[in-house]
Image: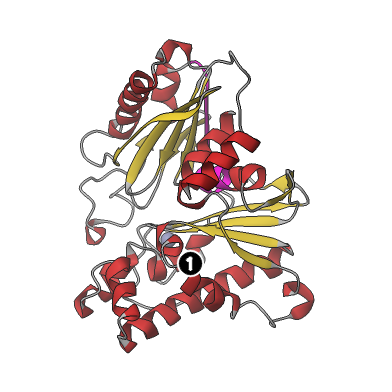
Amino acid sequence: MNTMIQNVLSDGFQLPAGAAPVACVDIGGTKVAVSIADALGVRGRVAEPTAKEGGRDALALQIIRLVGRSCQLAGVKSADLSAVGVSSCGPFVLRDGLVELAAPNICGGLAGKARGLPNDWTTALLEAPLRQAFANVRVENDGIGALEAERRWGALQIKGQPLSHCAYVTWSTGIGVGLCVDGHVLRGKNGNAGHAGHLFVSDNDDALCGCGNVGDVEGLIAGNAIPRRFGHLGYTDSATLFIASYAGDTRAAAIIDELCRVMGRTLYNLVVTLDLQRISIGGSVFWHHRELLIPKLQSHVRGKLAALTDGCELVPAGLGERVGDFGALALVA
Ligand SMILES: [Zn+2]
């Protein structure tokens, strides 16, 4: 994958010589990663577990501190940053036109104590503190950032031309989606278009999502759903589940098939709703097991309502595991 990223960088991404550097911030439910990009490439990468304790500004303060450290590592003055691109898990709410996060994997006040997060936040501050610290800030949901990166440098472009009807889906700690139809990236009234991880698909009462729903896609199959639903069977995370399956554990294999049925139907629903030509898929749960999962997911799309699904491809993310980093970069490069 490193080789692939190098090629992508040298072929597709270069800030012009002398251009001011930008900071790229990727906020996930598990970790926050920051890097600096300029004419020399992407460097100074730092990452930490996402701040979830303290005041509602804890995450924003963490980001400001990490941007400073990343600048130090890259040998760049933070005052010289021309922009800070933030690709974040959502959903967003707008307060005075500025983004706050109402993210189920970060804000413990959304689903209540049963979800087990160490705070009672209903939103985490984001854009307002960042705008006090930096001159130029662009915040988008990470599905949109990743989609833009995949359309520019990854699997959702052909010879540098972005596809017009496509989606990016991440299967990770949570489930995220970015959507593009007729060449337009869909954003929605608060920048939340693509939250298909919260589509209701079941009444399972063991599938509490961080958003408070019971039985939505994320509550059923996201990385953080696996210990909650299957921990009592010994599958304490997705890695344990897949390792057991590879070792011949038929119960683990059946669980994976059921996870793929839910994800496969979600992908089918996106294809038939939006008439898509390609979906690229990333995220840690998917990426580490993509050879196993792609054919299983395809089996839930291919042959169903062929007029809509024929010619639609499911492919691994062209930017691989670093699609999140490139998502933030795509917002400001
Ligand atoms: Zn949900």
The residue to which callout 1 is attached is 290
Looking at the rendered image, the quarter that the C terminus falls into is top right
52 relative to 281, above or below: above
Whether ligand 1 has any atom under 8 Å from the Cβ at mark 1 is answered as no
- At horizontal 23% and vertical 62% (from top left) the residue drawn is 114
Residue 274 is one of the magenta-drawn residues? no
- At horizontal 58% and vertical 41% (from top left) the residue drawn is 7
Give the quadrant of residue 241.
Answer: bottom left
Q: In this view of the protein, which residue sits in the foreground, 191 or 306?
A: 306
Measured as percent of width and height from the top left, residue 173 is found at 37, 57
Is there any visible trace of residue 203 in the rendered image?
no
The answer to whether residue 282 is left or right of residue 235 is right
The answer to whether residue 310 is left or right of residue 28 is right
Q: How is the image coloured?
A: secondary structure
Q: In this view of the protein, which residue sits in the foreground, 5 or 31?
A: 5
234 relative to 194, above or below: below
Q: What stretch is highlighted in magenta?
A: 135-146
- At horizontal 52% and vertical 66% (from top left) the residue drawn is 199
The answer to whether residue 35 is left or right of residue 163 is left
Circle 1: residue type = Arg
Is there any visible trace of residue 61 in the rendered image?
yes
Measured as percent of width and height from the top left, residue 192 is found at 55, 47
- At horizontal 41% and vertical 24% (from top left) the residue drawn is 130
Measured as percent of width and height from the top left, residue 197 is found at 49, 61
Measured as percent of width and height from the top left, residue 102 is found at 40, 45
99 relative to 69, above or below: below
193 relative to 85, above or below: below
* Badge 1 density bin: few <14, some 14–19, many ≥20, Cα 10 Å: some
Which residue sits furthest bottom?
Answer: 250
